[in-house]
Image: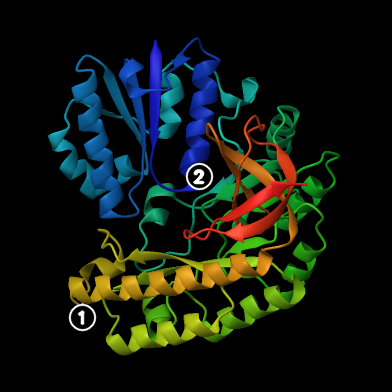
Amino acid sequence: MKVYIETFGCKVNFADSADILTMLANNSYEIAKDPEEADLYIVNSCSVTHRAERECRQIVRRFKNINPKAEILITGCSIKSEEFRDRASDIPFAKLIPFDDLLEYLALHKLEDIKPKFNRSRPFIKIQTGCDRFCSYCIVPHLRGKPQSVGKGIIIHRIEEALKQGFEEIVLVGTHIMLYKDPEGNGDIFDLLQRIEEMNYRFRLRLSSIEPYGITSDTIRLLMKSKKLCRHFHIALQSGSNRILRDMNRQYTKEEFEALISDIKTLIPQSTIGSDIIVGFPTEREEDFEETLETIRRLPVDYLHIFRFSPRKNTPAYNIKPVSTPAEIKRRAGILKKISFEKRRDMVLRSIGRDMDVVITDIDQSISSGITDNYIKVNIHKTGLKRGGMLRVRLISINPDNSANGEII
């Protein structure tokens, strides 16, 4: 039987899908590279926004049109979403299967019993899932539940298997990775990072998005000592207005966030810092947005991910009447995107002329591309490179899309 998997959402979902692929491949299933080849579809869904849920339903209908006789399974966060289940009446042919029940449904062996395989240039290793912070706009704690961590031994084993398969960058992912606690009492995220640091392999380690809660100057000093950790940190701000941060239940101020970012830039020079911003939170007025603009312009962040507020049922923000129109929210998002573009361009320009390690992520007929440890996309006009391998490259120029051109040295 040929299986095709479509994944929506965060890096945790992509890590979960990689686990599904590993289990399928070790249980006599054939993995389809193209949806036209499949007779079983698995859709790993996301419910962070209405758009993600809508795209999930759209792809399910597309799969049904491609192969009307195929079985279609939906797993992931959406099947726990009341709104998604209500709207799923328009795709009654799809089965909603919780992720933990997929093994039994498909008669798969447990992941711990088989050798993991990785289908990405940079394997995503899940270290935890779940969150109990309950930001007022966020549905994730309701869908993924309380924080649950993967055992340190399992994580180390999976990293080692990836390294043996020739990968040279590992990405640790989780809903809130700073909440990592080994379930057997063998330490927190910093103990895990120290154990990874001791692994006798040539590779680099990247952290997925982290939250500012609990990160101190001492924390940053621990990170700066690492010889493997990428100089790239994505830390969510969400708003530059303290009033909106309170309404969001973010539990920090913009001043505290700014102090954290400044400490990182001081202690880890040439690091790249990205952040998330939500525009159009229901209580966000024009003066709050102007405050966010002022904060972002002042902060030494290098790029932004901008999201328009999406009301999610069963969250406190769902019932708040918005004070801004959709047109105003769209305008605000556009302004922030321009600022993000300019900040990223400045960051890339500062790196032109430098020699950096680049992990190859994509290979085309005439060009290969990869990323530096500080998260710059680099295009290399050379074929035959190893996907997932690491090369020393000199950055020689910048492109209109803020990627760099590089030459192997």
| Left or right of 313 on screen, residue 129 | right
Determine which of the numbered discs, if any, sits on residue 298 in the image: none
Query: Which residue type does callout 1 highlight?
Result: Val
Distance (Cα) linking label 2 and label 1: 33 Å
Q: What residue did someone put label 1 on?
A: 323
| SS for callout 1 | loop
Residue nearer the viewer, 236 or 328: 328
**Callout 2: SS:** helix
**Residue most extreme to the bottom:** 287
Whether residue 249 can be seen here: no
Amino acid type, label 2: Val
Q: Position of residue 47 (x, y in %)?
A: 33, 49
Query: In percent of the image, x 50 and y 45: which residue is there?
Result: 12
**Structural crowding at the residue carrying mark 2, measured as other residues with C-alpha within 10 Å and reported as few (<14), some (14–19) or many (≥20):** many
The answer to whether the residue labelled 2 contacts the one labelled 1, judged by CB atoms less than 8 Å apart, is no
Rendering coords of residue 381 (x, y %):
61, 42
Q: Position of residue 68 (x, y in %)?
A: 19, 17
> Which residue is located at x 43 percent, y 20 percent?
104
Q: Is residue 278 left or right of residue 11?
A: left
Name the residue tied to disc 2.
12
Judge whether residue 317 can be spotted in this image.
Answer: yes
Left or right: where does residue 25 sit relative to residue 313?
right
**Sequence-first disc among 2 and 1:** 2
Residue 14 in the figure: left or right of residue 191 = left
| Residue at 19% over, 73% down | 327
Circle 1 crowding by C-alpha within 10 Å: few under 14, some 14–19, many from 20: some
Give residue 166's quadrant in the image. Answer: top right
Quarter holding the N terminus?
Answer: top left
Colouring chosen for the image of the structure: rainbow
Q: Could you say which is closer to the camera, residue 82 or residue 336? A: 336
Spot occupied by residue 221 in the image (x, y as percentages of width and height): 78, 70
Q: Is residue 238 above or below residue 312?
A: below
